[in-house]
Image (cartoon, rainbow, N blue to C red):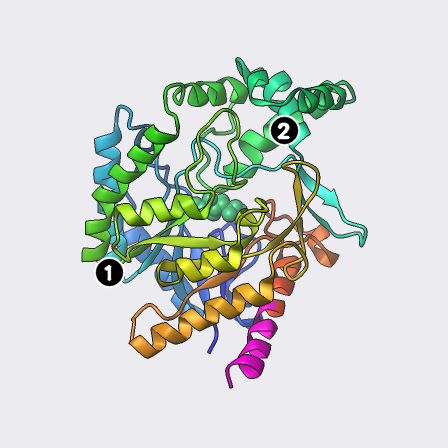
Amino acid sequence: MALEKTWRWFGKNDRIALSQLRQFGVEGIVTALHHIKAGEIWPVEEILAVKTEIEKYGMRWSVVESLPVSENIKTNGPGRDRDIANYLTSLKNLGTCGIDTVCYNFMPVLDWARTDLHYKNDSGAESMLFDFETFAAFDAYILNRPDAWKDYPKEVLAKAEAILSKMTPDEQNRLAYNIIVVTQGFINGTVGNVHDFKGVFLDFLDRYRDIHTDVLRKNLLSFINDVIPVAEQYGINLCIHPDDPPFPLLGLPRIASTAEDFEWMFSQCTSIANGLTFCSGSLAVRAENDLVEIVKRFADRIHFIHLRNIKRMAYRSFYESAHLDGEADMFSIVRALLEEQKRRKAAGRPDDRMPFRPDHGLKMLDDFGRESNPGYPLIGRMKGLVEIAALELGIEKACFS
Ligand code: DNO
């Protein structure tokens, strides 16, 4: 028994070819029609073209990550009904093509955030860092978001000022560009690579002026109520990705950060198609998130698994560490996931593949000579995949036989 080994592949422009992936055990591909903007329809022909290409190399299209939810839907703004109708059409098209797992997130504006994309580890490998004080410097002094200072403790602002004073204007601009464009660009980012990217970003933030936690929850629930019946009808499991990082940023509400958040969204709609992408790296940032408990509590609706690790630093800061080395107890997490897979097999559930992917990876060795999207180098991710596969085998032999 083992979780399905999958790999995020960014399509034809990805420097890592589909033809190479089976060499190290990849069984399924995680991808999306990245060129189609949030809110637009994914046509059958385009879905089939990608699916056929993947199958040509002996793998399957395991998971769509992501079918992006537009800002109109998240804010319940103008264009919402059109975008929902398009989302439903895309789901139907995916279901018709035999795709059964679709990941999405409900994070306002930013899909994820890091302040340093080249954080050097002692070993010489590189990963990514989120430094809360640097983020505060970006928010309050580089972006100049109105009233941003109100969201930070005084000490954090003081440190942010000190950080800012050591940065050249170029460095300040690079930080903003990384947060708003570089980390978002390859995954259907909200703000494109435009000259006034800060201004456009501020306009998007402004759309959330009156959207607090309760309103965002209400908007999520309307989305769930609209899409789950269609997902069920077409045999699709949807799975929300947790907030990354799992605490509010930029004055925006967060509703997928804790077990209580998930409890709420699953209690409102109990269909199994209303599921979770369990992301160890995102959830581990909050020390009070008990990851093994989260796996056990929501086990039957975990449709997709991201395994990576982090180390917490100062208040709300963290860096990405090697897959088996960090706050997330990978052994206990993987054991709990394998237990769920056993239950599914025993119950004859059709969704017993339980796809996981090594999420992100350290940049190492020849990764430095190749271009890759932030977080997605070949060797560091391959190391994660192989380590987790070996961990599974050990658990299987030691705990289950
Ligand atoms: C970053 C990823 C996210 C994730 C989306 C899911 O590397 O974890 O972009 O794919 O948030 O919707």
- Classify mark 1: helix, strand or loop: loop
- Classify mark 2: helix, strand or loop: helix
Mark 2 / mark 1, whichever is N-terminal? 2
Q: Is residue 142 magenta?
A: no
Tell me the quarter of the picture where residue 71 sits: top left
Tell me the quarter of the picture where residue 81 sits: top left
Q: CA distance from mark 2 to mark 1?
A: 41 Å
Q: Is residue 159 above or below residue 339?
A: above
Start-end of magenta stretch: 388-401
Amino acid at dot 2: Phe
Is residue 261 toward the left or the right of residue 154 in the image? left
Could you tell me residue 15's position as x and y percent? Answer: 57, 54
- 10 Å neighbourhood of mark 2: few (<14), some, or many (≥20)? many
- 10 Å neighbourhood of mark 1: few (<14), some, or many (≥20)? some
What label does residue 135 carry, if any?
2
Secondary structure that dominates the magenta span: helix
Q: Which residue is mark 1?
A: 235
Could you tell me residue 306's position as x and y percent? Answer: 50, 56
Could you tell me residue 112's position as x and y percent? Answer: 52, 39
Could you tell me residue 131's position as x and y percent? Answer: 67, 35
- Circles 2 and 1: CB atoms closer than 8 Å: no
Q: Is residue 78 above or below residue 343?
A: above
